Image: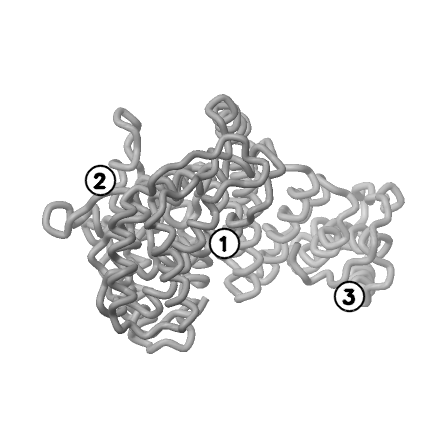
């Protein structure tokens, strides 16, 4: 999404101030964190949003995010946990901020809903604003995270941000609200229990007082407080009115007043009497809504009755299902982070992301996924010249899936790249390179790079010559592997 220059400058100024800490000691602890190298990949993605901005703005965001990683408001973040819970440690806080699990969305819901004051709770407010900054810049791009955020009641938290006395925060919150609501504004009946639970979250939002109160406050302003503040607010309100109308199949609609409807009616009248420059269709929309608010609207029934609501929540948030979904999402998101880092030539960050992906997936990781990720790790290690580690990763990839052509090719390259002084060991490695290259050739017979690697491996064996009185290890049998479709590129990441 595009970032207006004044918004980017204000965000960067806010992010220039990190959390609290003790300088070198805190930085040292952050350097030892398991997330340290992968954070470089995340930071690269965040800063990519500031391409084309002034150097000072980008530098401020860089500094602010690094400081947030080092000192992530551990004391204040504890307020997001249930009383009696174990305190946040550094790595857990870093995960929530920069590598969130699906279950971590509950922390964002709680944070955004906090009532904070610059006077009485400055640090808590800064923590909330910084969580919003990362959420707005990074996490909102992850549809699975956003789905869980809404399931967890996040719409209400975003609406509470509209009450902040900060135009940048209001602007970000309104933009998030539009993005989160857009796919849920369909008037078609839900087709699954999960979808009905999402619609129920929208229903709760549109029947809540803060939604109408905070949007009314924006609409009643005599001038724009951020670009398109009135136009977008009027559109959201119109969408809410339309969504709340009874469905055709609705058997139990009710005549009900809108919470804080009198505030919205007054705001719309002020807007129509004022001179805020908006398109004529928006002004007409406001006039139509004003007429609706003067009547008692008929409201649709809840998308989920109480009996089905408990069933839906049990299905979505049961411990086993949540663990499985968290593991699957973390594995894929960290894998994608690794691929992005590799594409940016951040090879150490890529390797760390792949390693963390396997750790996050744990016992839920499928063999095929494990093979592809280990193979990616091998490629990253090859790029930084760590052939021994590359060989180990490629071997693990083949253990998970003997038909992984890329893993076989990378194992051959790692064996060729690892120089061994001992003649016996050097020949063993050369023979393994031949076996791996032959396997890759069988799996991807038309790839010229495989043919080149196989030729190099055979030449290496000939150069080394026989080693007397030393039993040679049995070579791998490529015919045991199943032939896989030729890879588009053995250098590409999976």
User: Mark 1 to mark 2: distance in Å?
Assistant: 36 Å
Q: Residue at x 50, y 44 (%)?
A: 147
Residue 14 visible? The answer is no
Residue 363 vertical position relative to residue 492 in the rendered view, above or below: above
Q: Are marks 3 and 2 in contact (CB under 8 Å)?
A: no
Residue 115 vertical position relative to residue 17 in the rendered view, above or below: above
Q: Residue at x 50, y 30 (%)?
A: 252
Residue 297 vertical position relative to residue 321 in the rendered view, above or below: below
Q: Position of residue 273 (x, y in %)?
A: 25, 68
In the displayed orientation, state which residue is furthest to the right: 479
Q: Residue at x 51, y 37 (%)?
A: 326
Q: Earlier in the sequence, mark 1 or mark 2?
A: 2
Q: Residues within 10 Å of mark 3 (few under 14, many from 20)?
A: some
Q: Which residue is mark 1?
A: 182
Q: Which mark is residue 75?
A: 2
Q: Position of residue 9 (x, y in %)?
A: 28, 71
Q: Earlier in the sequence, mark 3 or mark 2?
A: 2
Q: Which residue is mark 3?
A: 449
Residue 274 vs residue 176, the one in the foreground: 274
Q: Position of residue 178 (x, y in %)?
A: 43, 56
């Amino acid at each position: 999404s595009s970032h207006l220059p004044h918004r980017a400058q204000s965000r960067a100024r806010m992010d220039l101030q990190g959390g609290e800490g003790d300088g070198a000691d805190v930085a040292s602890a952050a350097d030892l964190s398991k997330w340290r190298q992968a954070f470089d990949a995340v930071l690269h993605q965040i800063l990519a949003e500031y391409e084309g901005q002034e150097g000072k703005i980008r530098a401020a965001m860089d500094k602010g995010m690094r400081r947030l990683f080092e000192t992530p408001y551990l004391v204040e973040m504890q307020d997001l946990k249930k009383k009696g819970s174990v305190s946040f440690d550094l790595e857990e806080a870093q995960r929530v901020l920069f590598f969130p699990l699906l279950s971590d969305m509950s922390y964002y819901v709680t944070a955004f809903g906090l009532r904070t004051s610059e006077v009485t709770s400055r640090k808590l407010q800064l923590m909330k604003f910084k969580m919003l900054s990362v959420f707005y810049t990074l996490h909102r791009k992850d549809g699975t995270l956003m789905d869980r955020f809404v399931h967890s009641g996040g719409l209400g938290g975003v609406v509470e941000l509209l009450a902040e006395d900060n135009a940048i925060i209001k602007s970000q919150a309104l933009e998030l609200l539009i993005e989160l609501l857009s796919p849920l504004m369909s008037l078609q009946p839900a087709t699954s229990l999960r979808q009905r639970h999402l619609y129920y979250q929208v229903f709760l939002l549109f029947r809540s007082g803060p939604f109408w109160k905070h949007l009314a406050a924006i609409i009643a302003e005599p001038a724009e407080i951020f670009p398109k503040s009135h136009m977008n607010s009027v559109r959201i309100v119109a969408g809410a009115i339309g969504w709340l109308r009874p469905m055709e199949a609705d058997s139990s609609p009710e005549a009900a007043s809108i919470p804080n409807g009198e505030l919205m009616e007054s705001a719309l009248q002020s807007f129509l009497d004022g001179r805020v420059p908006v398109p004529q269709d928006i002004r007409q929309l406001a006039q139509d809504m004003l007429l609706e608010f003067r009547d008692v609207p008929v409201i649709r029934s809840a998308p989920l009755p109480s009996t089905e609501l408990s069933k839906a929540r049990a299905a979505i948030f049961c411990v086993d299902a949540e663990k499985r979904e968290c593991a699957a999402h973390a594995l894929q998101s960290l894998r994608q982070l690794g691929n992005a880092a590799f594409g940016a030539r951040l090879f150490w960050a890529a390797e760390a992301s792949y390693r963390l992906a396997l750790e996050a997936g744990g016992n839920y990781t499928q063999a095929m996924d494990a093979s592809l990720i280990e193979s990616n790790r091998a490629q990253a290690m090859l790029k930084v010249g760590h052939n021994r580690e590359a060989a180990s990763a490629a071997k693990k990839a083949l253990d998970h899936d003997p038909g992984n052509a890329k893993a076989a090719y990378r194992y051959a390259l790692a064996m060729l790249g690892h120089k061994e002084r001992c003649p016996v060991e050097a020949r063993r490695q050369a023979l393994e390179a031949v076996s791996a290259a032959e396997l890759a050739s069988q799996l991807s017979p038309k790839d010229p790079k495989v043919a080149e690697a196989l030729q190099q491996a055979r030449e290496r064996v000939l150069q080394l010559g026989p080693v007397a009185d030393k039993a040679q290890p049995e070579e791998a049998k490529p015919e045991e592997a199943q032939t896989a479709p030729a890879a588009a590129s053995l250098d590409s990441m999976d």
